[in-house]
Image (cartoon, grey):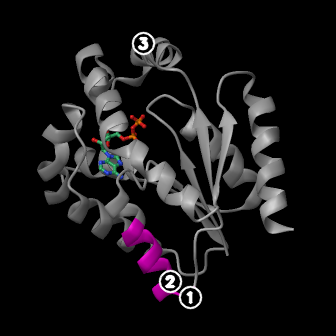
């Protein structure tokens, strides 16, 4: 299996690059942000539980997020592999993912971290806000999301670095150039 984690702060381009990776490697895309938004728009019980947290730019508790992720992996038993986008966002989530994959005799192949400056992130999300209709793209909420990233999510990087699985890619530049770099990394991982 080819299991990739696409890592980076809000607005780093994870969604864009995920789409390209899925098309190229025929992987199943698991975006916890998209899954939560699906629950919210379908007004499920889970959606009701998390909507305020998400609108405020806070992280959803690990227990809820991990359970949802495991369910999604189980739904795709025949998959050639997965792209995890927006997950793990805490070290506890990273550990839970490792344990869960191990129980399925699988593991994370590699982690690609998109490096983008805070200034660039703010500019990109301000632009996205005009079309996204996402309450959490509001400037105050965005500040909270970036804060959550630097307080909690950034610690996931050393976790994977210690496992020798982390590769950083400059997330500023032409979308196709960035994808070409990611493809090179993935091809190296699988050769
Ligand atoms: P972004 O564009 O900020 O990277 P996402 O679409 O990935 O955002 O996620 C939107 C929101 O969903 C997050 O701000 C957070 O509230 C919640 N969320 C998504 N993934 C996770 C996760 N792995 N753990 C906790 N909360 C999450």
> Of all residues shown, which one is farthest toward the front?
162
- Local crowd size for mark 1, using a 10 Å CA cut-off: few (<14), some (14–19), many (≥20): few
User: Which quadrant holds residue 175?
Assistant: top right
- Foreground residue among 42 and 151: 151
Residue position marked by numbered label 2 in the rendering: 102
**Residue 142 sits above or below residue 43 on the image:** above
Cα separation between marks 1 and 2: 5 Å
Marks 3, 2: nearer the viewer: 2
- x, y (%) of residue 27? 65, 62
- Helix, strand or loop at label 3? It is helix
Image marks 1 and 3: residues in contact by CB distance under 8 Å: no
Image marks 1 and 2: residues in contact by CB distance under 8 Å: yes
- Helix, strand or loop at label 2? It is helix
Cα separation between marks 3 and 2: 40 Å
Question: What residue range appears in magenta?
Answer: 95-105
Residue position marked by numbered label 3 in the rendering: 126
Q: Which mark is residue 105?
A: 1
Ligand 1 placement by image quarter: top left
Q: Per the image, is 134 magenta?
A: no
- Local crowd size for mark 3, using a 10 Å CA cut-off: few (<14), some (14–19), many (≥20): some
Magenta stretch secondary structure, dominant: helix
Q: Per the image, is 96 magenta?
A: yes
Q: Residue at x 64, y 29 (%)?
A: 171
Q: Is residue 55 left or right of residue 22?
A: left
Image marks 3 and 2: residues in contact by CB distance under 8 Å: no
């Amino acid at each position: 299996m080819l299991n990739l984690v696409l890592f980076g702060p809000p607005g780093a381009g994870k969604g864009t690059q995920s789409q390209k990776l899925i098309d190229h490697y025929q992987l199943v895309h698991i975006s916890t942000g998209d899954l939560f938004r699906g629950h919210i728009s379908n007004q499920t019980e889970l959606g009701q539980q998390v909507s305020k947290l998400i609108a405020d730019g806070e992280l959803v508790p690990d227990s809820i997020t991990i359970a949802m992720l495991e369910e999604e992996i189980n739904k795709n038993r025949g998959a050639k592999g997965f792209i995890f986008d927006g997950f793990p966002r805490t070290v506890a989530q990273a550990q839970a993912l490792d344990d869960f994959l191990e129980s399925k005799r699988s593991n994370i192949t590699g982690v690609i971290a998109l490096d983008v400056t805070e200034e660039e992130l703010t500019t990109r999300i301000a632009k996205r806000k005009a079309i996204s209709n996402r309450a959490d793209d509001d400037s105050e909420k965005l500040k909270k999301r970036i804060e959550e990233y630097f307080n909690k999510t950034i610690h996931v990087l050393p976790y994977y670095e210690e496992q020798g699985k982390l590769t950083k890619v400059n997330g500023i530049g032409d979308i196709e150039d960035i994808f070409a770099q990611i493809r090179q990394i993935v091809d190296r991982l699988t050769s």
